Every structure is written in C-alpha cells, then in structure tokens.
Image (cartoon, rainbow, N blue to C red):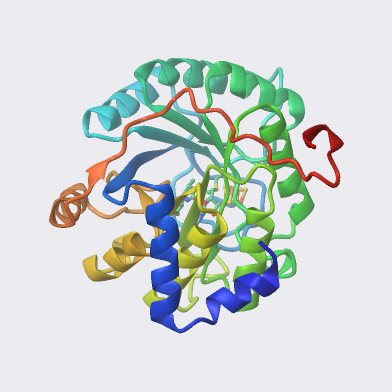
Amino acid sequence: MKYDELKRIYDLPFFELFQKAREVHVANWSADEIQLCTLLSIKTGGCSEDCSYCSQSSRHQSEIQREPLMELDAVMQRATAARDSGATRFCMGAAWKGVQTGTRQFNEVLEIVRNVAKLNMEVCVTLGELGPDEAKQLKDAGVTAYNHNLDTSREHYPNIVTSHTYDDRLKTIRHAQDAGMSVCCGGILGLGETVEDRLKMIEVISEFNPQPESVPINSLMPMPGTPLAEAHSVDIFDVVKMVAVARIACPKAKVRLSAGRSQMSEEGQTMCFFAGANSIFYGEKLLTTENSAIQRDLSLISKLEINPLKPNPEMNSPEVECDKELAPCCQ
Ligand code: SAM
Ligand code: DTB
Ligand code: SF4
C-alpha cells in the first residue's frame, strides 16, 4: 500500500480507523484467536552492530551479560517448556551481524533448528544477515519464518544504525523469501521517528512480494547504556493506530504486539487486539528484557474469551502475487 493511501487511512478520525481495521481483521481472521510465541535468546550480547536501541551491541555500555551460543540440550529444554505452557511458535534470536555457511556456529544453529522443528511448533529464527545459501539451509532444516525487522523508515534508519544499511536488510528478506521461508518483518515505535517514518516503513513492508507472514510492532524498551536509554515512551493511542494501519495494509499477516507490552495496561492491549493484533510474545522473557508475566497474559486472554491459535509448522511463504502488467505468465 502506498504512502499517500496509508496517510489518508492514518488521518481518519480515531474511531473510523479503529472500525476499518476491525472490519479487515474479522474478514481475514477468526476474531477470537491469538497466537502465543515464546522467544529465546540463544546467543546473547557482544554484537558487532551499532543499533542504538539494542542492549546487545558491543558498542554500548549496557549491563547485560554476554553469553555464547546455547547448547542444544538447553535450548530443547526451553522449547519443550514453551510448548508445554501453550506456545505454538518458538522464536530464537542471536546477537550476530549475520551467519555464514560452513562455520561451526551456523552448523550448531542448523542442528538446533532440526531438533526444535520436531516439537510441532512453528520455528522462527532471527540471526541477522543471510545470503541465499544460508537461507536455503535454514529452510531445509525446518525454519517456518525468518524474522528480520526494518525497524523504521529508510530515511530514519541511518540515525539509528550505521554499521549496516536498509538495503542490506532488504537483501536478507529477499533471500529468505526466495528460499521459501515466510518472513516476519516489522519495526520499533519510539526511535525518535515521525509519523511519516512509521508509515513509510509500513509502505515498504506491505509492498513486499509476497507480503510478510507476520508484522511485529515493538515499542522501544529503553535500555540503560544505549544511546536511546532516555527516549520518551510511545503513547498507547499511537501504538493502537499503528496496529490498525498494519492490519489494514497487511490483512493476511499476523500483527504481533511485541516488545513494550509489559508496560501496557490490559485496556491498552485490548484496544490493540481489537484493532487487529493477533499474536503476542508469551513467556517470562523477551530476549534480554522482562516480558509481561504469564499469569497476567492468561488472565487477560480468559477475560477477552479468546483462544490460542493452533500451530502451522508446515506453512510456506504465501504465494507471490503477480503484477499482470509485469508478469505476462499470469494473464
Ligand atoms: N541481530 C538480529 C537482527 O538485528 O536482526 C536479531 C536480533 S534483534 C535483537 C531483533 C529485533 O529486536 C530488532 O530488529 C528490534 O526490532 C528488536 N529490538 C531489539 N532491542 C529492542 C528494544 N530495546 N526495544 C524494542 N525492540 C527491540
Ligand atoms: C521482534 O520484533 N521483537 C523481538 C523479536 N522480534 C526477536 C525482540 C524484542 C526484543 C526486546 C528487547 C530485549 O529483550 O532485548
Ligand atoms: Fe546486533 Fe541485532 Fe542488536 Fe543490532 S539489533 S545490535 S544486529 S543483536
């Protein structure tokens, strides 16, 4: 969806936007379902990149403890516990610039993926940059979706990250899609961006071909020691509006209410769910920060009378929609 259209939608009176998003949501999803995903940081800290929001960059003086790549058995214990607590998707994150075929670490990650994939959960990984070969190996190992966020607009990106470019991010997403993985791609609100930046990011994400399978909407968790440690928090009504816009722009994607949820009231989260968010990170921890507590989430899910979504581990990347003018094969 193009920027001008997104801006027109964003500028609708709040209740009109809210209603339109709800209509798109119920037309595409069972409105009483929510996906529960559990995150695990399998390699923490010491990252070469300079993302100004991230506690795991070695360029900042943050307080988190560096940890090497976890052993297979320890990951399996966590994945099994996540499944037993009701999660249907297991997302593993690593603080790397990227991964490379033939390295010991990448081989270990592939072994972890092969084993987690046997647990009948969707398997998501976020490992940084991928080339075509790495993407194919991850797909063959059993990855359902690759998470690689654009985080903000192309224009604002260099104010946030200088150690890699927006185009580097787009290339990785292309490689993941070409290998047949679904893509999970979203961003962070609260990086000092404007509404225009937020909508431009959604423009790029919604124009992927195929559209992403999921769109995480994170609110910045200001991390001590990072350049954004003192950033202002995002108004919940702005979060709701971006959830609504993401829902309208990517009707068939899961919209995941991601980092920052622990700071939101139950009522704020409920507005986000009504506006089209249908997935959350569920479990005590995100990567390095506390998440909303399990009991609090279960209590809210029960009050709202919604049910955890079933897993779809065999899911393929959605079909590419051909542009009939550019692709005569589809005529
Ligand atoms: N290194 C890989 C990469 O950057 O793609 C994967 C891990 S990285 C931590 C995954 C995503 O977490 C980032 O793209 C960003 O959207 C999100 N994230 C990291 N720190 C955050 C923070 N303090 N607040 C909100 N979201 C954050
Ligand atoms: C995403 O969009 N958000 C998650 C996941 N994908 C990897 C990460 C949130 C990280 C929040 C800060 C932390 O725990 O370090
Ligand atoms: Fe490294 Fe990813 Fe954090 Fe950037 S967001 S510093 S690439 S772990």
The answer to which of 249 and 123 lies nearer the viewer is 249
Q: Where in the figure is residue 315, as x and y percent of width and height? A: 50, 28
x and y, in percent, of residue 280 in the image: 35, 49
Q: Is residue 331 above or below residue 142?
A: below
Q: Residue at x 47, y 35 (%)?
A: 92
The correct choice, above or below, for 231 with respect to 80 in the image is below
Q: Quadrant of the N terminus?
A: bottom right
How many numbered markers are drawn? 0
**Where residue 168 appears, x then y in whole percent?**
76, 47
- Residue sticking out furthest to the front: 331
Residue 87 falls in image quadrant: top left
- Residue occupying the point 78% across, 51% down: 167
Question: In which quadrant of the rendered image does the C terminus lie?
Answer: top right
In terms of image quadrants, where is residue 63? bottom left
* Residue at point 37%, 51% (across, down): 278
Front in this rendered view, residue 210 or 237: 210
Residue 240 appears in view: no
* Left or right, residue 29 beside residue 269: right
